[in-house]
Amino acid sequence: MGHRVRSAVVVLGALAAVLASVAVSIAVGPADLTTADVVSVVVSHLGGPAAEVSRIQDGIVWEMRLPRAVLAALCGTGLALCGAVMQSMLRNRLADPFVLGISSGASTGAVTVAVLGIGAGVLSLSSGAFVGAIVSFVLVMTLATGAGGGTGPVILAGVAGTQLFSALTSFIVLSSADAEQTRGVLFWLLGSLAGADWVDVWVCAAAVGIGVVVCVIAAPSLDAMTLGSDTATALGVPIGRLKVILLGVTALMTATIVAAAGAIGFVGLVLPHAARLLVGPRHSRLLPTTMAMGAVFMVWADTLARSIFGPQEIPVGVVTALVGVPAFALILLRGRGSRLRSAPRLVGAR
């Protein structure tokens, strides 16, 4: 019971941190706003009393910074959830949409629609990204299966897929886009939430919302899958159907996020490990905690991206990489230390 109470407190605290982070981050910047001003503007637009701020400040909060902060939270939620689900589904602690090439494939699909115009009359940017994400993941898993499966082949296949689709994206942009379009696409590919609006928020909220519902319902099955396919099957988990469903929702979330904000790496790789340290491996607690941590992380990463060198922005993907790479190294070192501690010692051997 004590562990459950502790987990509930962590989850509720993380959710509160999301709301607080969004409110405080919106006040950061040169517009002379306070957190109280931000709250009053949001309350007024939701039917409350009028906020005592200027029309310019009201527009900055409601039309510019709030959609951007909410979109950042949604992107962090979706990417962290994808990472946690993929790590459990593949039983691979290094799995995430960026490492396995799904983000790169989604970028290629989106750029194919935006720059080449292929399927533009039928496919939206998000639809093109979704097709690219599915193609990339199927290719990576086919390569990994042909190489015998396991952690090593999956990661190597992911690296190969990432390089392939990154090269295709660069080729399409450099060969078919003009100079201004090339600059905008390349900045977007590094991850950018500049220009976010409420349409982006609602589209991303729909995709992430579907993914959250499906993955939370599948939490008990994910617990079983971490024990291995044979054990999960013995417990009555439909492995094949569940993997198809989870692949679909993770690809949907990744594609929508890439279409809205570009390819943002390391969120899904690092944060599930941090959440496991706080609440353990049980997915009923792990998934909500991971999502909340992803939302908080992305909100503050985007705040740094738009303010640290203000008024010049840097891509948010640069910030997540600068934080994620050291954390990734710590995960590798921690895993190596765990293996060394668990190895049997040869007593008296010379």
Image (tube, rainbow, N blue to C red):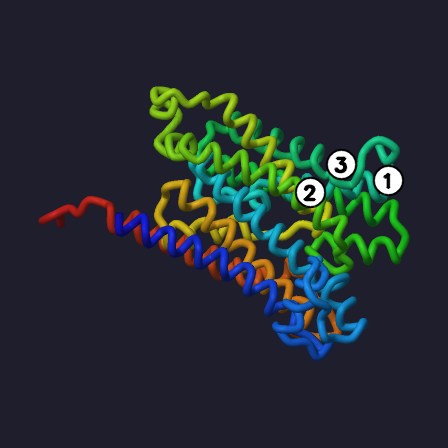
Tag 1 or tag 2, which sits nearer the N-term?
1
What label sits on residue 116 in the rendered view? 1
Between marks 1 and 3 in the image, the one whose residue lies nearer the viewer? 3
Q: Residues within 10 Å of mark 2 (few under 14, many from 20)?
A: many
- Amino acid type at circle 3 is Gly
In the picture, the disc for residue 256 is 2
- The image's mark for residue 128 is 3
Question: Which mark is first along the chain, 3 or 1?
Answer: 1
Q: How far apart are labels 1 and 3 at the CA level?
A: 11 Å
Badge 3 local density, few (<14 within 10 Å), some, or many (20+)?
many
Left or right of residue 338, residue 274 in this image = right
Three-letter residue code for mark 2: Thr
Taking the spot 48% from the left edge, 33% from the top edge, the residue there is 217
Residue at the image position 70 percent from the left and 79 percent from the top: 32
Q: Residue furthest left?
A: 348
Q: Nearer the viewer, mark 2 or mark 1?
A: 2
Please determine whether, in this image, residue 326 is positioned above or below residue 216: below
Whichever of labels 2 and 3 marks the residue nearer the N terminus, that label is: 3
Q: CA distance from mark 2 to mark 1?
A: 19 Å
The answer to whether one can see residue 256 in this image is yes
The residue under the point 48% across, 53% down is: 271
Q: Residue 165: percent from the left, percent from the top? A: 69, 41
